[in-house]
Image (cartoon, grey):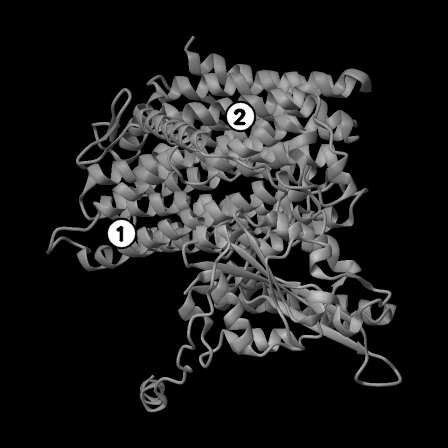
Amino acid sequence: MLGLLRKIRRTGRVAEPAPPSPVVDRSAVAAELGGSVQIRHVDAGSCNGCEVEIGSAFGPVYDAERYGARLVASPRHADALVVTGPVTRNMAEPLRRTYEAVPGPKLVVAVGDCARNCGVFAGAYGVAGAVRDVVPVDVEIAGCPPRPEAIVEGLRKLTGR
Amino acid sequence: MSLVAVGLGGALAAGVLTALAAVVVPRRVRSAVAGTGTVVTGGAGVMAGVGAMTGSSLSVALPGLLPLSGVSLTLDALGGLFVAVTGGVAVAAGVYGISYTRSHGLDARGVQVVFPLFVVAMLLVPAAASVGTFLVCWELMALFSLLLVVAEHRHRPEVAQAGRWYAVMTHLGFVAVLIGLLVFVAHAADDSFPALREAGRHLSPGAAGLVFVVTLAGFASKAGILPLHAWLPRAHPEAPSHVSALMSAAMVNPGVYGLVRVGFDLLGGGTLWWWLLVLALGAVSAVYGILQAAMSTDLKRLLGQSTTENMGLVLVGVGAAGVFATSGNRVLAGVALAAALLHVINHAAFKTLLFLAAGSVLHGTGARDLDALGGLRAGMPQTTAAFGLGALAASALPPGTAFVSEWLLLQALIHGLPAPGATGGTAAAIAMPLAVAAVALTAGLAVATFVKAFGVGFLAKPRSAAAGNAHESPPAMLVGMGLAGVACVVLALLPTLVLPAVGTVSGVALGVGDPAVSGAVTVRLAGVAGALSPLMLTLALLAAVVLVVGAVRVVAARRARRAARLWDCGGGPMSARMEYTATSFAEPLQRVFDDVVRPEQDVDVTHHEESRYLVQAVEYRRKVPDRVERRLYEPVLAAVAAWGRAGRRLATGSVHRYLGYGFYTLCAVLILVAVTR
């Protein structure tokens, strides 16, 4: 216990200084959420590259939670879905159901090139399409995989902070 | 002629006539005749018991009936209570048996003749007034019940094994009672109870202690008390369900009766350590019994283990009464004994209901394994309601039946802390808080157990085709369950109907004048500042529930609502295999009580023959063995088997050798005679 406290004291704060706010104009739905966005992540067929970056974005260095975004464990608790990967045939229906399970007002963020336009998997036999072909998408974050800074920036557009 | 004489005579006559009628009538009507006759027998028993509890008593001596000892019967208030309970259970089980035996192929002569005789034997045990009569009735009760336990031995091999366990254990118990009472009789003028009562006053402490401990072993084995409980969860579930109800609700009670009769009445109260022993046995049995029940996945076995728990609670009450009585607090002793006796009545009511409902499940689905049941609400709504009521009655929560008696028991235990300097003060000061803790733990585990039994067994989705095709039982079985259910409701809401009589019985048994409990709607205790009104409590609870539900409705109506699919992780319809099973429900409890129950599990991984990195099959087995049985019974059984194998060496098959044995034995006897003469 003491060792842990000592470690905390010695390490100090590792979070990067907050970059200037990217918010220009928020959508009406995002504004309704009042700066606190609970997020459910759905892996619709990703290679897990984006998951590593999302994990990093919510880690101590980039610390997306300080801007009001928070990952939750069920779509019933969520305001927004973060979807990664091209939507595979097996995940198309579960993704639709997950979207229906989120209480309104709700938002969808497509993270990574695969989620935006199927990336290198475009036209593959197991792929049903991009995320916007299955559920309506509000924000897209480009990159393969997107850098954590990009993800944080995308999420700040929702929280407005 | 008094009510008692008419009732007891009527019960005897009805029982024997029913047995005779069951021999002669054709198979078509045999179940109906035997069932109706049993109902009449039980009804007459209730009449006799109630008559005896309300003041009149009966003494009959028939010296010519049984050689050497004769038969003498006396039904007093204490015996009356047990006769009334047995009679009541017999009425419900009799009605139920009419349909149950017919549909389970049990309408052959054997079962139908023995069933009413079993009831008669049980009714006579508390009415016996001499050691000879008592032991004969006790043995008849054991033999008739043994015949009923093995009724289905042709269909299932486990029945025969259960029958063997039961036969051996019940006879060891009988031998213990026999030895204890014979030692007692050796100090008395004859074997009648009044003579024993007289002798009990002058018995030396050592002899009295010996009599008490040896008879306690016998009575405890009948009541399924640790460590002599091993037969109970075997024999009770394997018997036909109406017999299970009669055994589990009525046949364990003579154990309590014998303990109270011998300990308080005949031996006159005894010393402190007797009752501390009873208290400890009761507390350990209660906790261990309910823990085993919480782990159990077999519906009827679970109920059998819960019988051990409830008899343990009764023994806690009896033991506490003894502790209070020996330390001079007779009023509180009356309250404790009244709690124990009320729990006997309550347990009989809800255990009858639960076993009959379990029998109905067996009838409707053919399964007893909780992991294969579920979803019975749709197919058998009445049985589900009956079991739900029984489960509520068995868990000590406010509108339930067991709540009243456990509340009384806790009141007695909490107020049992002795004044400083009283005799036996230290022992009681240590024992009472521990007993309170044991009763509280038992009550909590009982709730978990019955939530499991009801929730997993009856609600959710069916886990097997048999449970999915469940069908409701015929009317006679429903009527039997209904009778037991009405008894549960009455005992839960208006315990004051029976409590004054129970209080009087416990007062008489302890030699206190005033009844321990009084009150018309509110239960008031003598000498203790405690009062309870179950009816008002239930009404208040109902009002609170209605209020909360109404408020939620009103608030919810104002908000916009959206109907959505049940969240199943988006994966599609949830199957029955995703449900909680009885095993998984009990898993956290099993983890908590890991040191007590010691579950055995082993995992077998079979690898692919080409590579150790590829797994072909994983086999997982888990068992929760009875630890007492493993530690205590298995070494004894192994030793007996070893002696048997050693003894076999004596019998090699050579005739010369056997003639030699005979010759040498004869010589030895002759020498012995010549020397000792």
Quadrant of the image containing the C terminus of chain B: bottom right
Residue B368 visible, this angle: yes
Judged by depth in the image, the label closer to the viewer, 1 or 2, is: 2
Chain ID, mark 2: B
Check disc 2 and give the amino acid type. Ala
Residue tagged by mark 1? B271
Residue that label 2 marks: B484
- Marks 1 and 2 sit apart, C-alpha to C-alpha, by 39 Å
Residue B264 rendering spot, x and y as whole percentages: 32, 40
Q: Is residue B660 visible?
A: no
Q: As drawn, which residue projects farthest toward the right?
A: B610
Give the amino acid at mark 1: Thr
Along the polypeptide, which appears first: circle 1 or circle 2?
1
Determine the image quadrant of residue B510.
top left
The answer to whether the residues at label 1 and label 2 have Cβ atoms under 8 Å apart is no
User: Tag 1, which secondary structure?
Assistant: loop
Residue B495, percent from left and from top: 36, 26
Q: Residue placed at 24% from the left, 31% from the top? A: B516
Task: Give left or right: position of B657 versus A154.
Answer: right
Q: Residue furthest front?
A: A24
Q: Could you say where residue B321 lies in the image, as x and y percent from the top left?
A: 29, 43
Q: Residue B111, relative to residue B427: is it above or below?
A: above
Residue located 18% across and 44% down the image: B328
Residue under the point 78% across and 49% down: B157
Relative horizontal placement of residue A17, taking residue B291 as reference (left or right)? left
SS for tag 2?
A: helix
Q: Are marks 1 and 2 on the same chain?
A: yes
In the rendered image, the vertical position of residue B49 relative to residue A139, given as above or below: above
Q: From the viewer's side, name the closer residue of B541 and B151.
A: B541
